[in-house]
Image (cartoon, rainbow, N blue to C red):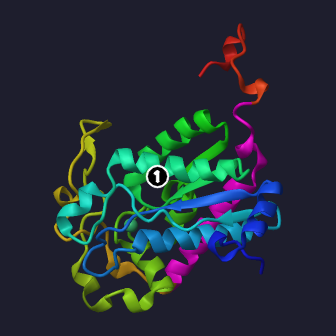
Amino acid sequence: MSEVLWERMKAHELRDLAAKNAVVIVPVASIEQHGPHLPTMTDTRIGREIAVRAARRASPKRVVVVTPVVWCGLSEHHMSFGGTITLSPETFQRVLRDVVGALVRLGFHDILLSNSHGGNHIAMQHAAETLSIELRATIIATTYLREAAEAITPLLDDQAGVHHACEAETSMMLALEPDLVDASALDRLATPADPPLLLAGKASFRWRPFSGATRNGVIGNPARATAAKGESLLDAIAGALADLVTDGANWANPHAPSNEFRGADRSNRG
Ligand SMILES: [Zn+2]
């Protein structure tokens, strides 16, 4: 199996990958509380795993390399539970800017920012927009629980998508790090799977700490988790990310003349 991890390669091997127009996956995650039963690295561990599996699945069609995880994300809303390290929004943008800027300086220009923490989602879209314009690269920001939603939902018994320290995340951690999952009290941790965490009105946003939605840091029912389910989830999610990477249309150069505003052609507005 060919190597996909950036940190395991030599500099000259990475220069070769840039010359081959490899896609770089930058996993972006968090270190934050995940209830009383999962370790704080849950999003970081899952994010790394799905990036590596996606890179291997994509490799027959497209060369892909995975950087180390940007492990610190936007987790202010989890701070009150302890165990959580967060960046400020300004620092988060600057970290992404410098990491992606370095990749572009090295000759890479197709970059996938692959997010595994819900709190990073909107900020990463913002980063993809500003950095695509500033660095003239093609930057895709994805959050796996959205990109792979169609594949995830049929695999779950108790919830329609990924929540927090829930059936889905606990299953994936049982598959990846069974020794770090405290399974002794899973049946006492369930909380409603669709609390109104970030909503106001019908479709409006307000900030709230996570403790406003859950007493124990869990959203969902981790008692429904199994390692087999976790393996199926990781596989399905990696497949969705591999499809994202290998579809050439996704990497069309946004700065090519054909994509620029076409004067009188009003059908292209939007
Ligand atoms: Zn998580």
Foreground residue among 202 and 101: 101
In the image shown, does 116 or 103 lie closer to the viewer? 103
Give the magenta range: 228-255
Q: Quadrant of the N terminus?
A: bottom right
Label 1 environment density (alpha carbons within 10 Å; few <14, some 14–19, many ≥20) = some
The percent coordinates of residue 108 (x first, y second) are: 71, 51
* Side of 251 relative to 190 (left or right): right
Taking 200 as reference, is 16 above or below it? below
- Image point (25%, 64%), residue name: 192
| Residue 79 position in % (x across, y down) | 22, 62
- The residue labelled by disc 1 is 95
Q: Is mark 1 within 8 Å of ligand 1?
A: no
- In the image, residue 177 above or below residue 265: below
Q: Based on the displayed image, in which of its 4 quarters is residue 117 positioned?
A: bottom left
In the displayed structure image, the side of residue 94 where residue 240 appears, left or right:
right
Q: Residue most toward the top?
A: 264
Residue 15 image position (x, y, % from top left):
77, 61
Q: Horizontal placement of 228 versus 62: left or right?
A: left
**Horizontal side of residue 4 vs 221, given as left or right:** right
Residue visible at 57% across and 77% down in the picture: 232
- Quadrant where the C terminus is found in the figure: top right
Q: Residue at x 62, y 18 (%)?
A: 269
Q: Amino acid at mark 1?
A: Val
Instruction: Find numbered disc 1 in the image and state the secondary structure of the residue it sits on.
Output: helix
Q: Is residue 240 magenta?
A: yes
- The quarter of the picture showing ligand 1: bottom left
Of residues 125 and 144, the one nearer the viewer is 125
The quadrant holding residue 252 is top right
Q: 187 or 176, which lies in front?
A: 176
Which percent across, then down, holds residue 37? 29, 82
